[in-house]
Image (spheres, grey):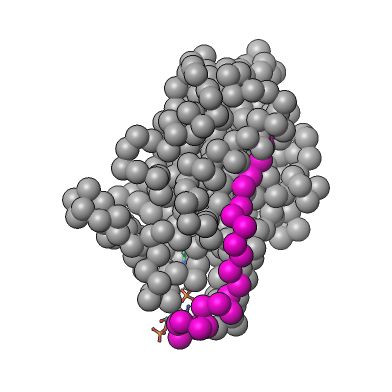
Amino acid sequence: MTKRAVVIGCGHYLPERVVENAEFEKTLDTDDAWIRSRSGIERRHFAAEGETTSSMATAAARAALADAGIEADDLDAIVLATSTADLTFPSAATMVQAELNMNKGFAFDVQAVCAGFVYALSNANALIISGQAKRVLVIGAETFSRIMDWTDRSTCVLFGDGAGALILEAQEGDGTAEDRGILSTDLNSDGRYRDLLYVDGGVSTGTSGYLRMQGNQVFRHAVAKLAATATTAMEAANVTADDVDWIVPHQANIRIIQGTAKKLDLPMDRVVVTVQDHGNTSAASIPLALSVGRTRGQIKPGDLIVTEAIGGGLAWGAVVLRW
Ligand code: ACO
């Protein structure tokens, strides 16, 4: 028998305010057609005043707990992927722990920018298979609207806010690719590319800063690295592209999503796409897409799923799991 981290619940939260591309035409030299054709984005959600990464994460966590039919005290750990924690410290994860009245276990943040959720899943999987935790709440939550330079048309039209959450539970499997749960993970980073995508603030500047991105340079790395990490993870799980029911990619740009699917030889009708409605929500994008994909009736129990993401660092990775 093999211990597996199996998804027993999922949920998401999106702020009420929806901003269409046309809104940006009022303040920037841009238009809906450019944003749509270059990125696939049509609209995004922005957090209201007073809404924070931890409050959105808590809402997504509550939805996932209700979906799993368990209480917060049934959890052993919270792993929260974010680059936009409410404060420098404590972690947003401990804030969620308090809000959920979870009075045991442990909680921590993982920071790998847009790759954060695959890093968090990989960490949660390690906690489960090593026996350190039986049930782990894994959240991706971001408030990127708070780190946008609203005068920079090349970045501020691309990002959105939101949160998604999964609950993983230790269950016994046979050790084959037919098992439910996480079958493999692959993580990578290369700090030589740190200047392609960063926030120009933090403890060293005394400001929270703004996102800076050489988008076309990041784009150049994205398709090749995403296809490579997905392939490595599929090989480790002993599955091929033919076995895959759904690719659930990081939702940054429809052209990256299409390019990666093509390189993996997977048709677009086996890709969950939410970028048009959410924009790039960084670490929240994969759990949001998983939750929305399930709500749409795309993702069903037993489906084989590959998630892949790349972001600042550069950091990238993939997870293969059976739902
Ligand atoms: N409206 C109109 N024109 C614009 C806009 C805009 N909003 N933004 C940029 N342009 C212009 C540029 O100024 C440039 O003009 P120029 O040729 O006169 O200089 C032109 O459009 C082309 O710009 P590019 O940056 O080359 O456009 P590209 O086709 O590469 O698309 C984009 C830009 C959408 C950013 C794309 O490069 C991309 O998606 N990159 C990857 C982003 C990503 O995946 N990041 C990783 C995750 S994010 C994270 O980790 C936080």
In the image shown, does 26 or 107 lie closer to the viewer?
A: 26
Q: What quarter of the picture does the N terminus occupy?
A: top right
Q: Is residue 165 left or right of residue 223?
A: right
Residue under the point 49% across and 71% down: 157
Residue under the point 58% across and 79% down: 22
242 above or below 181?
A: below
Magenta span has 16?
A: yes
Q: Is residue 176 left or right of residue 84?
A: right
In the image shown, does 248 or 16 lie closer to the viewer?
A: 16
Residue 50 drawn at (x, y percent): 47, 51
Residue under the point 74% across and 45% down: 294
Residue 259 visible, this angle: no
- Residue ranking furthest to the left: 204
Using the rendered view, name the quadrant where residue 257 is placed: bottom right
- Residue ranking furthest to the right: 297
Residue under the point 42% across and 38% down: 92
* Count of numbered tags: 0
In the image, which residues are magenta?
9-30
Residue 76 drawn at (x, y percent): 53, 19
- Residue ranking furthest to the front: 50
Magenta span has 196?
A: no
Residue 302 visible, this angle: yes
Q: What quarter of the picture does the C terminus occupy?
A: top right
302 above or below 22?
A: above
Q: Dividing the image into four equal quarters, which quarter contains ligand 1?
A: bottom left
Q: Is residue 293 left or right of residue 104?
A: right
143 above or below 259?
A: above
Using the rendered view, name the quadrant where residue 6 is placed: top right
